[in-house]
Amino acid sequence: MTLTIRLSDEQVIALEAKAAAEGLSVEEWIQKLATPAQSVADPAQHIADIILDNMKEVPPEIMAAMPKDGASQHDHYIYGWPKKPE
């Protein structure tokens, strides 16, 4: 199938730059955009299961360095606020 889209010179330059940044031609880059993602999460899957599945590949030394009170003290770790009394 062939699709013709009229673009301004500025739009063409922007598309070429985005494609080149990924080492692709404009045609390859647009085909990549039009290709459905390979791993689409099951919408019925619980978010906790998705997170656990993603965390399986985190090296043990990284997991060991993570704070144990990250959930209860998230404002401290995200924003630098003082820790809440426990």
Image (spheres, helix red, strand yellow):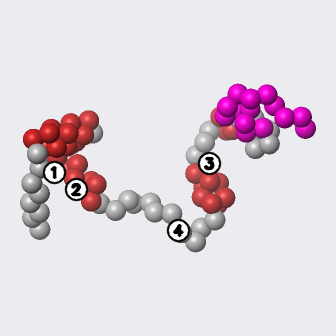
Query: What's under tag 3, amino acid-wise?
Result: Met
Which residue corresponds to mark 4?
Answer: 42
Which numbered disc flags the more N-terminal residue, 3 or 1? Answer: 1
Which numbered disc flags the more N-terminal residue, 4 or 2? Answer: 2
Q: Secondary structure at mark 1?
A: helix
Which numbered disc flags the more N-terminal residue, 1 or 4? Answer: 1
Q: Secondary structure at mark 3?
A: helix
Q: Residues within 10 Å of mark 2 (few under 14, many from 20)?
A: few
- The image quarter in which residue 70 lies: top right
Asked if 22 appears above or below 7 in the picture, the reply is above
Q: Which residues are magenta?
A: 73-86
Which residue corresponds to mark 2?
Answer: 31
Query: What's under tag 1, amino acid-wise?
Result: Glu
Given residues 9 and 52, the one toward you in this image is: 9
Q: Is residue 37 magenta?
A: no
Would you say the residues marked 2 and 1 are in contact, meaning their CB atoms lie under 8 Å apart? Answer: yes
Left of 50 or right of it: where is 19? left
Q: Which mark is residue 27?
A: 1
Q: Secondary structure at mark 2?
A: helix
Which numbered disc flags the more N-terminal residue, 3 or 2? Answer: 2
Asked if 64 appears above or below 2 in the picture, the reply is above
Which numbered disc flags the more N-terminal residue, 3 or 4? Answer: 4
Q: Which mark is residue 73?
A: none
Q: Residue at x 79, y 28 (%)?
A: 82
Q: Residues within 10 Å of mark 1 (few under 14, many from 20)?
A: few
Which residue corresponds to mark 3?
Answer: 55
Asked if 15 appears above or below 85 in the picture, the reply is below
Left of 36 or right of it: where is 64? right
Query: What's under tag 4, amino acid-wise?
Result: Asp
Q: Residues within 10 Å of mark 4 (few under 14, many from 20)?
A: few
